[in-house]
Image (spheres, grey):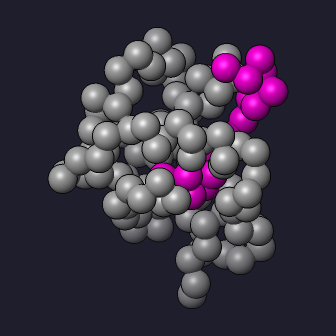
Amino acid sequence: MKISLTRYGFQQKNDEPEVDENSPAVQKLVDIVRTFKKSDKYCRKHTSYRFKHVLENYLAGITNREITYVGNGEFIKAMMIAGFEWKISSPNSPNAIFKISMDSFKGLEEYFKCV
């Protein structure tokens, strides 16, 4: 069965549309994650689901609450566009892990407390 990247993450069923890489949320996320530092090792401490919540809270603040929701799949797509290596975090999981340095989140620590 084909695995699709939907707004909710990786899905084996095909009843959800694929993530639109041109959506405002994805484009804003791409701008942010392009500033992140890549790593040689996968960050196993947090999955895409945790990171998406952190950036969701951050985006709500910088967009004056214009963007208050970010889908897991939208975050994953943004990381792909920005060139981060990724893999599905575990079999049948909607989440991904990335080769990203946690140093990328310096200055965003307060948003980790919100999730």
Q: Position of residue 49 (x, y in %)?
A: 51, 43
Give the residue drawn at x 29%, y 47%: 38
Membership of 65 in magenta stretch:
yes
* Quarter location, residue 8: bottom right
Give the residue drawn at x 29%, y 32%: 102
Q: Position of residue 66 (x, y in %)?
A: 81, 27
Image check: 68 left or right of 108? Answer: right
Q: Which residues are magenta?
A: 62-79
Q: Position of residue 48 (x, y in %)?
A: 47, 46
Membership of 48 in magenta stretch:
no
Is 36 placed above or below 54 here? below
Is 12 placed above or below 96 here? below
Identity of the residue furthest to the left in this view? 40
Identity of the residue furthest to the right in this view? 66
- Is residue 44 something that shows in the picture? no
Give the residue drawn at x 56%, y 46%: 30
Of the 4 image quadrants, the one containing the N terminus is bottom right
* Quarter location, residue 112: top left
Give the residue drawn at x 74%, y 29%: 68
Image check: 115 left or right of 74? Answer: left
**Towards the viewer: 32 or 16:** 32
Is 20 placed above or below 35 here? below
Q: Position of residue 115 (x, y in %)?
A: 52, 23
- Is residue 11 something that shows in the picture? yes
Callout count: 0
Identity of the residue furthest to the bottom in this view? 1
